[in-house]
Image: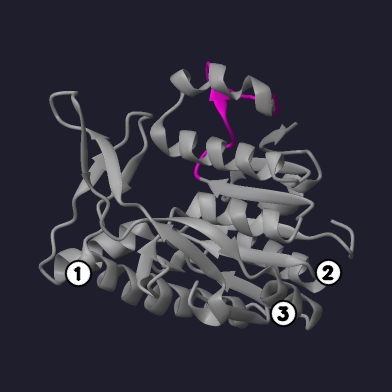
């Protein structure tokens, strides 16, 4: 990554789960942060689910006709999501980054109007009998704008923005937005040179082998062969490159120098136009 490059990276909430920190990833992030231009978006849905259960709020998940599984977010769930995602998880990740010498600033979509989203009025889901039906949209949103000026200001000051996927709705309500799609929106807004999605596998797999390169036009043919989690990342990656990001990379976060190796073309799956 050259000093003038901008890279958006999506990490999972598992970075702060358990006692063992992912040191190779953190050291790699530290190295990239020193070059400037690094933006991080984090997930953490499993941690939200765990805390919701502790609070006595059982979580409901729905599946779209395209096979995407997502959390059904009513008002109470939205409040728990905001508390855990933008509060506990974001703060812990920023603390770990600071420990490794990364001058991070934690942000949610509410800070400086960073992420604005339009609330989904209706969701079309597939029920257990395989039938499509429409339900109330709840507090789930689709990002409509990103305050790129705020991100650029932080980058120019030498900071690493760490963004939680919590957006502000048109009525200033908290909205659950997909982390992968949030990363794509952020990357597009700053015209990043690359967006990197870290996962627990080496890349997009076909027949047990990693596909090294995929053209955005070829994606549809792969979707039937892969699971819903990877499908979401591929859709987000395509959205990013169609929006002006030069390349999107899906790779494992558990290798040595996982991001640097991917950016050098040695690891992962590259999606481009």
Residue at figure coordinates x 67%, y 66% from the top left = 39
Q: Nearer the viewer, residue 93 or 241?
A: 241
Question: x and y percent of residue 67 in the render?
Answer: 35, 31
Relative to 196, residue 54 above or below: below
Question: x and y percent of residue 141 in the render?
Answer: 40, 56
On the rendered structure, is 226 left or right of 163?
left
Element at badge 1?
A: helix
Q: Quadrant of the N terminus?
A: bottom right
Give neighbour class at mark 3: few <14, some 14-19, many 20+ (Cα, 10 Å): some
On the rendered structure, is 2 left or right of 8?
right
CA gap, disc 3 and disc 2: 14 Å
User: Which disc is residue 35 wearing?
Assistant: 2
CA gap, disc 1 and disc 3: 32 Å
Residue under numbered circle 3: 154
Q: Earlier in the sequence, mark 3 or mark 2?
A: 2
Residue under numbered circle 1: 76
On the rendered structure, is 51 left or right of 237?
left
Question: x and y percent of residue 256 in the render?
Answer: 67, 51
Residue at figure coordinates x 23%, y 46% from the top left = 61
Element at badge 2?
A: helix
Residues in magenta, as a range: 200-214
Q: Nearer the viewer, residue 259 or 19?
A: 259
CB within 8 Å, label 1 to label 2: no
Q: Is residue 10 magenta?
A: no
Residue 138 appears in which quarter of the rendering? bottom left
Residue at figure coordinates x 51%, y 66% from the top left = 116
Relative to 262, residue 131 above or below: above
Question: x and y percent of residue 130 in the render?
Answer: 19, 23
Q: Is residue 208 magenta?
A: yes
CA gap, disc 1 and disc 2: 41 Å
Q: Residue furthest left?
A: 56
């Amino acid at each position: 990554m050259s000093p003038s490059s901008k890279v958006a990276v999506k990490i999972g909430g598992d970075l702060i789960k358990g006692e063992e920190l992912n040191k190779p990833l953190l050291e790699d992030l530290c190295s990239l942060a020193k070059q400037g231009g690094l933006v991080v978006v984090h997930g953490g849905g499993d941690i939200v689910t765990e805390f919701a259960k502790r609070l006595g709020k059982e979580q409901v998940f729905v599946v779209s006709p395209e096979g995407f599984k997502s959390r059904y977010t009513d008002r109470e769930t939205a409040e728990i999501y905001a508390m855990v995602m933008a509060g506990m998880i974001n703060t812990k990740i920023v603390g770990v980054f600071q420990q490794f010498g990364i001058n991070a600033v934690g942000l949610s979509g509410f800070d400086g109007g960073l992420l604005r989203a339009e609330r989904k009025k209706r969701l079309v889901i597939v029920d257990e009998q395989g039938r499509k039906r429409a339900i109330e949209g709840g507090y789930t949103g689709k990002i409509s704008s990103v305050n790129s000026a705020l991100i650029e200001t932080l980058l120019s000051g030498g900071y690493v923005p760490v963004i939680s996927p919590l957006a502000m709705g048109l009525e200033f309500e908290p909205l659950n937005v997909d982390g992968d799609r949030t990363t794509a929106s952020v990357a597009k807004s700053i015209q990043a040179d690359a967006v990197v999605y870290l996962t627990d596998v080496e890349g997009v797999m076909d027949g047990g082998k990693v596909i090294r390169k995929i053209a955005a036009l070829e994606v549809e043919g792969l979707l039937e062969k892969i699971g819903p989690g990877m499908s979401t990342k591929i859709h987000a990656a395509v959205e990013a490159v169609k929006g002006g990001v030069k390349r999107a990379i899906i790779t494992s976060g558990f290798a040595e120098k996982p991001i640097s190796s991917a950016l050098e073309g040695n690891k992962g799956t590259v999606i481009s136009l």
